[in-house]
Image (tube, rainbow, N blue to C red):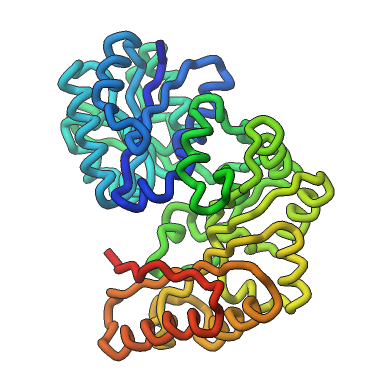
């Protein structure tokens, strides 16, 4: 029996082809698990019978609440489907939404009849305090920072919550999920699958399309290298997974700290292979060939790099703070001196973008492949 039910929506084809650990739900479970609350995570990506699972849990658990993490897009439909199913079973079970979409549009979200609370921004402390309040029958929620709630059916909001110190969070409760399911879903990256973790949050840059400007207030915060090593050791020693995926927004925001983490991992003799999600071209551009080779020696196998556009006009417009020439130079340097596989992200559909700008993007897309056979370019995303 669970005190709290948490639901991870699908993410279309992307979610099925790249099934990372449900990091957001694990994060908001951390304090609850530490305090002895029983948490059940239902992942729609892994459980085709999630509706049956949810109804079964509702019948046997009488949960304090049902929570969902939702980002803009198809996850809204999944979130509403699960919320309606919960309310159809019992209107008295509170439904809580968190994640990027409700954080950006909290009032628009909470006016839905199937949603009772919205956690705006980071959810670890806010959700923990909400669950405790509901558990003890509290009905005044105005002092829970970061929370939207309803009073006489009208949306109300508590004060914003301050950004937290990541070192004060517990190690994530990975025992709440079947790690092997997610290892299997990431074998396209590493033969034994990949264990995803987040060592920092946010980014100091202000790219206009990025959620960080609002969600993380354009600030970068990081765990200590020692705490990061503790998580990597957990993946290797407890779960026997040696493919580590850092899903930081900007892992190399502080290159000195990044090197400290990698050197600690090397010194521990863990023999891991590394994938980095958030990598900026300008960070790599500052590294010499020998530094990139050192990065490879320390375990880096994949670098996912945000290029976005081949048009300098568009890069300037979106405040990317980089140059097309840097992309070309970094790509050539990686091809010449390392076996690291760069994964490049591109996007079209920006305001003011012309056919010429799109042509420059596709030209750069092709050139990167020509200059570096190890480069990975799967598709061009569109701004939505």
Residue 195 occupies quadrant: top right
The residue lying at 54 percent from left, 88 percent from top is 325
The residue lying at 60 percent from left, 51 percent from top is 200
The residue lying at 47 percent from left, 16 percent from top is 38
The residue lying at 28 percent from left, 74 percent from top is 349
* Residue nearest the viewer, comparing 238 with 146: 238
* Residue nearest the viewer, comparing 342 with 280: 342
Query: Residue 374 at what x, y percent from top left?
Result: 56, 72
Query: Residue 1 at what x, y percent from top left?
Result: 40, 10
Give the side of residue 153 with respect to residue 301, left or right.
left
Location of the C terminus (image quadrant): bottom left
Query: Residue 257 at what x, y percent from top left?
Result: 73, 58
Quick one: which residue is furthest to the front in this view?
191
- Up the image or down, 285 lies above or below 197; here it is below
Question: Can residue 325 be seen in this snapshot?
Answer: yes
- Up the image or down, 288 lies above or below 174; here it is below
Question: Can residue 23 be seen in this snapshot?
Answer: no
Query: Residue 146 at what x, y percent from top left?
Result: 42, 38
Quick one: which residue is furthest to the bottom in this view?
356
Give the side of residue 320 with respect to residue 108, left or right.
right
- Up the image or down, 288 lies above or below 345; here it is below
- Up the image or down, 275 lies above or below 84; here it is below
**What is the count of numbered marks?**
0
């Amino acid at each position: 029996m669970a005190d709290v039910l948490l639901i991870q929506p699908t993410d279309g084809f992307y979610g099925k082809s790249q099934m990372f650990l449900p990091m957001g739900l694990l994060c908001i479970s951390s304090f609850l698990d530490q305090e002895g609350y029983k948490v059940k995570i239902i992942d729609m990506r892994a459980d085709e019978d999630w509706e049956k699972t949810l109804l079964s849990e509702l019948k046997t658990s009488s949960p304090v609440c049902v929570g969902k993490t939702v980002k803009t897009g198809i996850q809204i439909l999944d979130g509403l489907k699960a919320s309606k199913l919960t309310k159809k079973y019992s209107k008295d079970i509170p439904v809580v939404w968190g994640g990027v979409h409700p954080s950006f549009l909290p009032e628009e979200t909470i006016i839905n009849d199937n949603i009772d609370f919205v956690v705006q921004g980071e959810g670890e402390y806010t959700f923990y305090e909400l669950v405790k309040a509901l558990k003890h029958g509290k009905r005044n929620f105005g002092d829970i920072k970061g929370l939207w709630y309803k009073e006489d059916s009208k949306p109300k909001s508590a004060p914003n919550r301050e950004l937290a110190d990541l070192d004060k969070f517990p190690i994530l409760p990975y025992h709440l999920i079947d790690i092997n399911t997610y290892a299997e879903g990431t074998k396209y990256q590493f033969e034994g699958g990949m264990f995803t973790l987040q060592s920092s949050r946010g980014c100091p840059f202000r790219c206009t399309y990025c959620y960080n400007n609002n969600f993380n207030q354009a600030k970068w915060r990081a765990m200590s290298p020692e705490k990061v090593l503790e998580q990597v050791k957990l993946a290797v020693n407890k779960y026997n997974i040696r493919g580590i995926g850092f899903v930081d927004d900007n892992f190399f925001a502080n290159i000195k700290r990044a090197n400290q983490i990698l050197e600690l991992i090397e010194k521990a003799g863990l023999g891991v292979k590394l994938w980095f999600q958030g990598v900026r071209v300008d960070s790599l551009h500052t590294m010499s060939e020998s530094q990139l080779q050192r990065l490879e020696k320390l375990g880096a196998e994949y670098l996912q790099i945000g290029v976005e556009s081949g048009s300098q006009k568009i890069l300037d417009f979106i405040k990317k703070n980089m140059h097309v020439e840097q992309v070309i130079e970094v790509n050539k340097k990686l091809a010449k001196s390392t076996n690291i596989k760069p994964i490049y992200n591109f996007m079209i559909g920006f305001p003011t973008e012309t056919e010429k700008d799109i042509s420059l993007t596709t030209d750069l897309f092709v050139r990167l492949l020509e200059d570096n056979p190890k480069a990975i370019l799967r598709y061009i995303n569109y701004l939505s």
